[in-house]
Amino acid sequence: MEQQEPGYFEQTEAMLRQYVNDRILLLKLKASQQSAKLAAQVFVLMIMVLLGLLVLLFLSLTAAYYFADLTGSLLYGFGIVAGFYLLLLIIVLLVRKKYLSPYLTNMVIRIILDKTHDDESVDTNQPN
């Protein structure tokens, strides 16, 4: 007995399974690419924040000693700098829901949904 070639429906089913597997793999690859991009940008942002905090710390100490020299008291000099930071904290707490949270949310969404040059160059209307 000769073995028959698979029929039309069996071939279509096999092609459909392969297509679905390929689409799942493509989605996984795109998700991992976007996750890696987001992680890299978060890492760079953390380094920038750390360096910024160090600069801010030393500038604050410098300002505190400057004001201490002007007022003649370390307590007043450091108190002026602490009061300035307390004022900044109050301002940030007042505007965080209206301005800060939407800005950060939109930035993360932009990073995740950013199309790369490769994605834009592929024309999905043309058959392979």
Image (cartoon, helix red, strand yellow):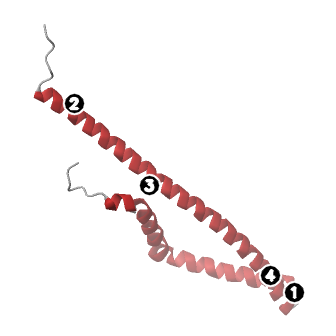
Q: Nearer the viewer's eye, disc 2 or disc 4? A: 2
In-front residue for pair 113/117? 117
Which residue in the structure is indicated by mark 2?
14
Q: Nearer the viewer's eye, disc 2 or disc 1? A: 2
Could you tell me which residue is drawn at 46 percent across and 76 percent down? 99
Asked whether, in this view, residue 14 is left or right of residue 114, the answer is left
Instruction: Answer with mark 3 or mark 1, whichever residue precedes in sequence.
Output: 3
Instruction: Answer with mark 3 or mark 2, whichever residue precedes in sequence.
Output: 2
Which residue in the structure is indicated by mark 1?
73
Could you tell me which residue is drawn at 75 percent across and 85 percent down? 80
Quadrant (top left/top right/bottom left/bottom right) for the N terminus: top left
Tell me which amino acid carries mark 3.
Gln
Distance Cα–Cα, label 3 vs label 2: 30 Å
Q: Nearer the viewer's eye, disc 3 or disc 2? A: 2
Residue placed farthest to the right in the image? 72
Task: Count all numbered tags in the image, as a single digit.
Answer: 4
The disc at residue 62 is: 4
Distance Cα–Cα, label 3 vs label 1: 53 Å
Tell me which amino acid carries mark 1.
Ser
Instruction: Answer with mark 3 or mark 4, whichever residue precedes in sequence.
Output: 3
Instruction: Answer with mark 2 or mark 4, whichever residue precedes in sequence.
Output: 2
Residue placed farthest to the bottom in the image? 70
SS class, disc 1:
loop
Which residue in the structure is indicated by mark 3?
34
Could you tell me which residue is drawn at 69 percent across and 68 percent down? 51
Q: Are marks 2 and 1 in contact (CB under 8 Å)?
A: no
